[in-house]
Amino acid sequence: MAAVTRPLPRRERLRQTTIEEIKKAAHKQLTEHGAAGLSLRAVAREMGMTPSAIYRYFDSRAALIHVLAQDAYSSLADVLEAAFDAAPTDDHMVRWLLVARSHRRWAMLNPTEYTLIFGPQPDDLTDPSTAVLDELERSVAVLLRCMAEAIEAGVFDPSGLEAELSPNLRRQFEAWDCDDSGLGPVAEAACMLVWTQLHGLLALDLFGHLPEPLRGSGELFDQQMIGALVRVGCQIPVDFAEVINRADRVAAGIGQGAPEPDAGAAPPDLGAAPPGAGRAAPRVLPPA
């Protein structure tokens, strides 16, 4: 017999509703003023509450920032896990590209959240809570799974990076707390190279630092994401155009469309080629 789920008491439902309203008002403050401009007093004023009343829900600005960061990481992790699960298990290049595109799409649709967790770190997050770290690790775990399963399948061999690791850097990777992935320091270095390539390009684009002709270029993003994998030891010949075309076909089948643009803005280019369009891209072979 199925267990009966009892509804929350009315008092608790009202409390949860108020918490969501506080987070919505705080999100508006983040969007308009950034993390540095967020204050409980301003949020209370936005909601028509007294400053003292809001402390019944969040006892400090740091507590509110932590919950917002936890929600952001959780949202991102959900998107990345969904992309990973929907991608073909036997095409590791395409799976990584779809995961990376999903990360980019999430960032474009949620610039306030992206800036909070990947922009300049607020002082309140220098010592993140366990709940925040758990959601952060969920998102990072998707990248680690992409790499671990590709190595197991023989698609990647990052051992070529071994010579690039100084003894001190190797110790730093060994100290990195991602033991559950089963990756050693060399593979972790490969993950870090790919991860920084992803976030570096995203940040340059989202914060307006790319040259004008390249801003919002999905084709640049695809080329950089595939190139990052080639750099860390891809063991199979890679035709960039063919990988992108395969990813486009899979994305069309699972409904991975472009984000809705802001009113009046040009639609962002997420790298999906229009029907019949070809892509001029070189055939790249892995290092000997």
Image (cartoon, rainbow, N blue to C red):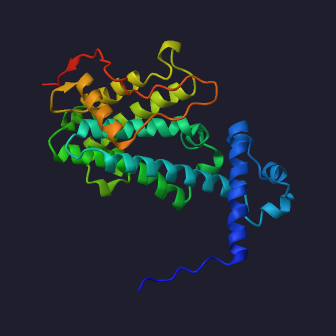
- The mark tally for this picture is 0
Can I make out residue 176 in this image?
Answer: no
Please determine whether, in this image, residue 280 is positioned above or below residue 73: above
In the picture, the quarter occupied by the N terminus is bottom left
Residue 203 or residue 259, whichever sits in front: 259
Residue 39 percent across, percent down from the top left: 77, 49
Q: Nearer the viewer, residue 2 or 179?
A: 2
Q: Position of residue 239 (x, y in %)?
A: 21, 24
Residue 64 seen by the camera: yes
Whether residue 190 sits left or right of residue 288 in the image: it is right
Name which quarter of the figure residue 283 lies in: top left
Q: Nearer the viewer, residue 111 or 118?
A: 111
Question: Residue 182: x, y in percent?
Answer: 26, 54
**Quadrant including the C terminus:** top left
Can you tell which quarter of the image residue 83 is in?
top left
Judge left or right: residue 8 versus residue 56.
Answer: left
Left/right of residue 20 with respect to residue 176 in the rendered view: right
Instruction: Reply above or below: 137 against 230.
Output: below
Q: Nearer the viewer, residue 132 or 217?
A: 217
Residue drawn at 35 percent across, 45 percent down: 143
Q: Residue furthest front?
A: 275
Q: Is residue 5 left or right of residue 43?
A: left
Q: Residue at x 38, y 37 (%)?
A: 100
* Residue furthest out toward the left: 288
Residue 268 location, x and y as percent? 51, 26
